Amino acid sequence: MNVPSANPNPLDLSGLHPDTVAVAAGRPHAAGQPVNTPMIPVSNYDSGAGPEYARGDGTDGWRALEDAIGALEGGKALAFSSGMAAISALFDQLPSGAKIVIPDDCYQGTATVAADGAERLGWRVMRLPTADTDRWVQAAAGADFIWMETPSNPLLEIGNIAEVSAAAERAGAVVAVDNTVATPLLQRPLELGATYSVHSATKFIGGHSDLLAGLVVCADRKAGWDGFANLTRRRTYGGATPGTLESFLALRGLRTLSIRLERAQANAMELAERLEAHRLVTKVRYPGLASHPDHDLARETLDGPGAMLSFELVGSAVSTDVRLSKLHLIHRATSLGAVETCIERRNKLAGQEHIPPTLCRLSVGIEHVDDLWADLVQAIDGLVD
Ligand SMILES: *Cc1c(COP(=O)(O)O)cnc(C)c1O
């Protein structure tokens, strides 16, 4: 192997725009080295000089992904085999009887982890509406762990991370934010005072529906609490380590996140406006619309309204399903954050009974907006109620 030469022009990421950090971080940056961290499938190392075994000691591939996301969000990142593996590792740290706050409009996997803990370990789980900041601030006083998800999914409600984190800090509670929907380019929870930011890299970071991966970024804000060490231990002994190919693809996805997001957001804004004006659409939820109840807070906390929107149609669940069945281009599929546009009527899923029956969640991709609109309109107009 070549001995890497010292880089005569070391890169200082501080002060660079997030769009640039997403491209530049997590690269070798040394003379004679490849510009990409190579994909080296490995479990075992020759012993005596550092890493011994990949499950505990990691691989260059994960570390490159962790370095890049950590640099973007201003903390130390740990990669996992999926978003749920990352979320489970965080919740696994909570003791019996822990007092936990989660949103009403919570990712169903996370709500299930909390409900299981309530049953097995006596966790006391309070659920609050994402946008009701006063109630979150009040609840922080008696809580151990606060889980925020903003923008929420599929209701696109906006939570106030800064205010809730300040209240939590006063009370000695830990705040974690599921940042999957916003992405590290639109929102950086640690800068707003949260202790942890969590991603399903399966979604926007990967961006191509071809991998499962997750990340936790740690700020280690609470005195006497080494979240990074605790989580590393969880990953080592829980074994939810990211794959070699998945780490490579997630980092490759991150390189283009800013331009994918730019197009997807522009499409989402245009579709939200057109849908709002459509006679068969009764409601559109998108933080970029002036009609959104948290439009101002969204402008304050987010660097853009994102690529997710929801709309409700006249009629019933059944007529909505018939309409969606007429789509050609847009995938009827559950995941989000990819280059291809996906739609789902959310209320049909277990645990989503609180969602209005005709609500369709649209994860907007990077296709031409007029093709997306034409497909939506022919499907919506294709059924006479
Ligand atoms: C998909 C998703 C998760 C879970 O991530 P996986 O990678 O599927 O395990 C968690 N939170 C949100 C908001 C998600 O969309």
Image (cartoon, rainbow, N blue to C red):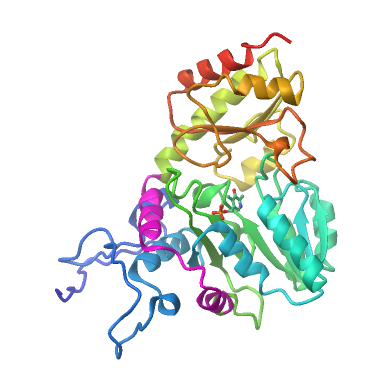
Residue in front for this viewpoint, 252 or 191: 252
The residue most toward the bottom is: 48
Asked if residue 214 is positioned above or below residue 121 in the image, the reply reads above
Asked if residue 83 is positioned above or below residue 381 in the image, the reply reads below
Across and down, in percent, residue 194 comes to 64, 63
Q: Quadrant of the C terminus?
A: top right
Q: Name the residue at 75% across, 73% down.
A: 172
Region in magenta: 230-256
Side (left or right) of 260 relative to 316: left
Q: Count of labels shown?
A: 0
Q: Name the residue at 40% across, 66% down.
A: 62
Residue 161 shows in this picture: no
Which quarter of the picture shows residue 118?
Answer: bottom right
Across and down, in percent, residue 89 comes to 60, 69
- Magenta span includes 66: no
Q: Name the residue at 47% across, 40% down.
A: 338
Q: Quadrant of the N terminus?
A: bottom left
Q: Name the residue at 74% across, 46% down.
A: 105
Which quarter of the picture shows residue 256?
Answer: top left
Across and down, in percent, residue 117 comes to 75, 67
- Magenta span includes 249: yes
